[in-house]
Each structure stands twice: as structure tokens, then as C-alpha cells.
Image: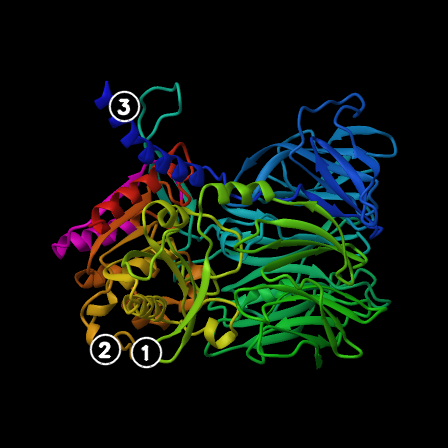
Amino acid sequence: MKKLILAACLLLPLLAHADLLDDITAGKFKAQPLEETTPMSDGERYAALVNGNVYAYSYKTGAVTDTLFDINRTGKLKIDAVDGFVLSPSDRYLLVYNHSKQIFRHSFTADYYLYDRKRGELKVLSDTMPVREPVFSPNGEYIAFVRENNLYIHKVVYGTEVAVTKDGVADKIFCGATDWLYEEEFATTALYQFSPDSKQLAFVRLDEREVPSFSWVEYLSEEGEGLHYPAVRELHYPKAGDNNAVASVCVYDTYYKSIKTIQLPEQRDSYIPRIRWTNATPDVPTGEVVVLRMNRNQNKMEVFLGNPKSTLSRRLYAEESKKYFVDYSCFDEWQWLSDNSILVVSEEDGYRHVYKYSAQGMRQSLLTKGNFDVTALYGYDEAAGMLYYQAADKNPMTRYVYQLNVKKGTVKALTPEEGVHNAVFSANLAYFTDAFQSVRTPNRYTLCNREGKKLRELKNNNAVAERAKAAGLPVKEFFSFVTPRGDTLNGWMLRPNDFSEGRQYPVLMMQYSGPASQQVLNRWRIDWEEYLAAQEGFICVCVDGRGTDARGRAFRGATYSKLGLLEAEDQVAAALWLGEQPYVDKSRIAIWGWSYGGFQTLMSMSICSMEQGLTAGASFGNNAGNSPFRCGIAVAPVTDWRLYDSAYTERYMQRPELNPKGYENSALPQLARHLQGRALIVHGLADDNVHAQNAFLYVEALVREGKQFEMQIYPDDNHFLRRRSNYNHLYHRMLVFLRAQMVK
């Protein structure tokens, strides 16, 4: 009996450790978001979904001013749940939806219902459901939506439906909706919008009939189905250099029921990732269609204005670079003012800043100034001359919200607390919700007025913070160091709770390293690194190398046309710097990452033994030829950029025929002989983003070179490995690997 009690006591710490890792993978330390909210048109209220009902709240008092939708009072038609809602511009109508079904990463179909607040009636949006992406016209009389790749318009007053397009075909022609590539790499799920007078509907048509398809096999049977033959799944997926979908901009006239195509200067091989409308003018009462076009290599951005009647277009703006990619996402911050002058966000002076342009596209003034990036433009109060924006001005690890008096040139910080602040402003810019987080504070939501005065707290995650404290999770500390070539890099570090300068600890470095990404931020994010520091005695470190965000265009674009090399140099430099610290056991340094981070893990484990000159002047001193990494874990890694999708890859690498050396130097299968240290390679076999082909080609090269490695596969799972119990299993698998390789 005593032996049994002793054995049980010895197991308790192990069980506790496992429970903590399980709690982390289950999201028990993840901050909960604020309920879905939408600013209302009057600027004084916002709408929120609470327990299936939609309420209107006063910004000033926080009191409920109206029940916009009551799930128990919907007239004859009853529904059982509400996943979300969409308000009409006048706030009279709501669209509520349920039974959501995911398509790709962000897109989904759902059953949508139109609720008339005045009549208290709920009706189906369409007799044939599900549909996707409904959009109200500015006057609230029409609702455009997509069903099976075709656009439709629902007439609100009459309850009738009109087919805008009829040529949409699944996996071939997309009318208004976007394909996998546009959704994944341009962060958009719908490309259609009504004109200011609601009489025209502009949309992008994507023809992907010439786009190659990629297929994969699903092996597992559905529950209860029994054994069956594996199923083959297929997706149009253009790899680097392949044919893309052909994009065109069309305009549908709601009166004549006709479609016209906007005439753009000939450039067949291009992207149209955004469209919108200018404000109406006496000359063009419908407004003009604003078309953003990127060339294939995405180092040139053009903005055109298209006349919806004549279909003629003129170029309003152009930006081109020979040294860097041009960031299309800057266009998302552009704002057209009442006179059609434009607030333009661009990087033309080396940092992201806000410029004032005339309606004719002439640059007039620079509004924000300094060696920092403006990371969001929230709005401009024309009457008061106040500009509201977010910036990473104090250091790259933080984000603050600012008010700029354009006339006086004075700047006021509205969110002084150190960390990351994201704002959602009311329609009249009188109020904003501040979503704040830091390494010590999980997401906290506070309502403020336009001067930054806190009116009340909407939600906090204090319980999550207490849970983390009770679990003994360490807190990230920020640091910086200078690489041998003179670059200052920023990082964070997690130390064991019983840390002592007199001991030496194993180190696990995590990173993502992708272009314009950022992992070193003063934000709340608990992952297995906290577990490893708290329970396994690891020091965990993350360093953002060259190519990452919020440090200006030159730093962000440093890796252009040579992905993998500079980032790996910086991770090696970080490992060597760590190895010089007295509290680090330099013989036990590991590295890991997911997706681009997986690619970087394998590159970092290979770069030290590459031939002279391949790394563009890397300086490893006495460590040349010797990797500082004992082992590494690569989850879902890209291993050859010729295998990845066209839009992402060519944005940073150009097309393969224009940059063959860059592709060759970053191809891991060709560098397999240089791998040093033990590698664990992980991939989901149904990954539609980074195909498992990447892992298999690299594995074949390792076998050919006689390199031993470990591998973990997950059948029928995608890039995120969240299906069934895979995610939890993955972290336990990685823990087993680390213990075997790193524990003395």
C-alpha cells in the first residue's frame, strides 16, 4: 500500500504538468472577445448581439435604448438561433443569419432572414438558401448577395429577387464572390458594392478556368459510415508562375438590368483585389467606380476611376518600386472625403503615412510625420479638422491611438497605457471602443469619447489573468540585441519561475519570420512556450528579424526576392547571442515554427553549412559551418516556393522566371545536405494552403542525403490541425520530441 501511495504521489506533478499543457491547447488562457457590435448610423448608438437578440446601446450612457431584434418576437416565421447580424444603413432593417457553413478560411454560407423593425416581420432573404455575403444598398431598398457563384439582388419593399448574373459556375466563374487565392492572399471574401445612389452595382468577375487544380486524398470515413475508398478532393490553386484567374470589373444597372464592363488599360495578368465608389458629384451622380489593380509581381499599384455609363476609366494614382513589393493593404486605409479629395496611406517616404490628395489625384500635403508606421486610419472629422489613427511610433512592439489636429499640427495620444490598442469608432467619430491588451493584461474593452476620456468598461478578461497567475505562468520580458552585421533586433523572453543567473537552461526559440509579420508585440498571447518555461525549465525566446513589420519600408522589404536567407541569418545570430549569455546552455538551443515559421526553422538549421556567398554576406565568425541549433520542429512548412500559391509568393519573390536564383537558393530540398541537428517535420495531409507535397519532397531529399529525421502526419486535417483531437496531440508530440532531444 505504501508503495502505491508513493507511486501516486510521484505521478501527481506529471499529471499537473499535462493538465496545464492541455488547458493551454484548449484555450483556457485565451482572452474572450467583445460580443459582436456594430456602430449605428446616428453616431450615438451601437448594436450588439446578446443571447440571440440584438440591442441598441447608447454610447454616452451605456443604457439599452431599443430592442432591434427579439428572437422570440418575429411574427409567423420562427428561427432557433442567430449567429450574427447585418444592419441596414437606416437601421430599419436587419439581416440575421444562422446555420453558418465555412467555405474557405473566412468565407461562409448561411441562412439569412430579413427583419423589418417597423412591421415586426421576419422573412427569408431568399427562397433558395444558403447564400453568402449580403450587402445593403445605401438607400436600404436592395440587398445584393451571392448564391452558387452568381449575384442576386433582393428588392426589400417587394420581396422579389433578380438574378444579376447567370454565368457563374462553381470552381470556374466567380461573380462577386472570391476564389481561394483572393480570400487567402488578399483578405477579401466579396468584391461587390452599390453606388452612392443605389442604382448601380459594381462587382469583380473572376474567371479561373485556366487555373491549375491541386488534389489531395482524404482517408478517414465519416463517423458511422464504415470503411470506404479514400476520396479525392480538388481545388483551383495557382502555384508560383501558373495561370491566375482573369479579373474584370463589371457594373449592373438596376433599372435597365444591363451589365457593362469597365475598360481598363490592357494588362491581362493582374489582380483586382478591391473596388469601391467615389462620392456622387453633379457630373457623375452615381459616383465613379474605384478600381485597385496590382500587377502580377505586385511591385506596382494603380488606382483607376471608371465611369459606370461610358465604361471609360482614367488612372488616378500609381505607385511602383524596383526594390520592394507595394503593399496593397495600404489601400484599405484610404478615405474619400465629401469633395472626393482623398486621404491616402502609402510608404513613399519610407514609412507608412497619411497624405492628402486632391480629387484629381494630385498630392497636396503630408499629414503624419516621423520615422514610424501609421498602422490604421480610423477617420477624419472634416468640420473639426481632426484625424484619428493608430501608430507604432513609440516602439514597434506597441500600438497607440492618436488624434491629430490637422490645422494646428498638434498630436494627442488617446490611449496612453503601454501595450496594443485597437479602436472602433462611432459613425460620427464622437466615441470609440478601445480594445487594449499587453503581456500582463488580457483583452480589455473600454468605451471612450473622442478626447480619449474613458466613459466605462465594456468587458474585461480579469478572470483569465487570474487563471494565468494561479497557474504560475511567467510573463514575457522584452529585449534587444545587435547582430554581427549591425542590425538591432527586438525579442521577448520567458524565463522559468525559479530562474537563477547561476544556472544554465535549455532554450526554445519560436518565430514566424514571414514578410510584414510580427510576433514580438506587447500583447496577450499564451501558448505552449509559457508551459515550457513554467513546468519544463526552458527559456523561451522569440526574435523578429529583417522582413518583419512596423519598422519602416526598408526593414520590412529587406527580404524581397530572397525569402529565407536573411531571416535565417537573423535567427542564427539570435541563437549565437543567446549562447553567450551565462544563463544559457548553448549546447541545448532548439527552434520551432509553423507555416512560414516551419520553413524558417529548417532554413535556420541549414544555413550555417551552406557554401560561401549563398547567404549574402552572413557573418557567423567561429561558428561558420556549425549550427547553433540542436534540434528543430517544422509544422506545415513551405519547403520550395515554387510549390506555394502565386499571389503570396510572387509578391515577395517575383515570378520564378524573373528570379530563378532566388527560388533556387531558398529551396529546402536542394539544401537537404546542409541540415544540422535533429528535425521533427509535421504536416496535415489535407492542407489546402501549404500542401503536404512540400514535406514529402523535402523528406525524399533528406532520405537521399542519408539524413535522419522524425515525422508526424495527421490524416484529413488542414493547415491549422484543429480537427478531432489533433491540436492537443501535436503539442504533446512536440513535447516528447523536445524532452528526448534537449533534456540531459
Could you classify mark 2 by the number of other residues whose Cα lies within 10 Å: few (under 14), some (14-19), or many (20 or more)? few
Q: Position of residue 113 (x, y in %)?
A: 72, 32
Scheme of colours in the image:
rainbow
Q: Is residue 212 magenta?
A: no
Q: Is residue 234 above or below residue 243?
A: above
Q: Which disc is residue 484 wearing?
A: 1
- Which residue ends up furthest to the left in the rendered image? 706
Region of the chain picked out in magenta, as a range:
694-718
Q: Which residue is mark 2?
A: 621
Q: Who's the residue at 19% across and 68% down the image?
A: 626
Q: CA distance from mark 3 to mark 1?
A: 55 Å
Q: Is residue 203 visible?
A: no
Q: Amino acid at mark 1?
A: Pro
Q: Amino acid at mark 3?
A: Ile
Where does the N terminus fall, quadrant-wise?
Answer: top left
Q: Amino acid at mark 2?
A: Gly
Q: Is residue 264 visible?
A: yes
Q: Which residue is mark 3?
A: 5
**Camera-side residue of 57 and 694:** 57
Circle 2 SS class:
helix
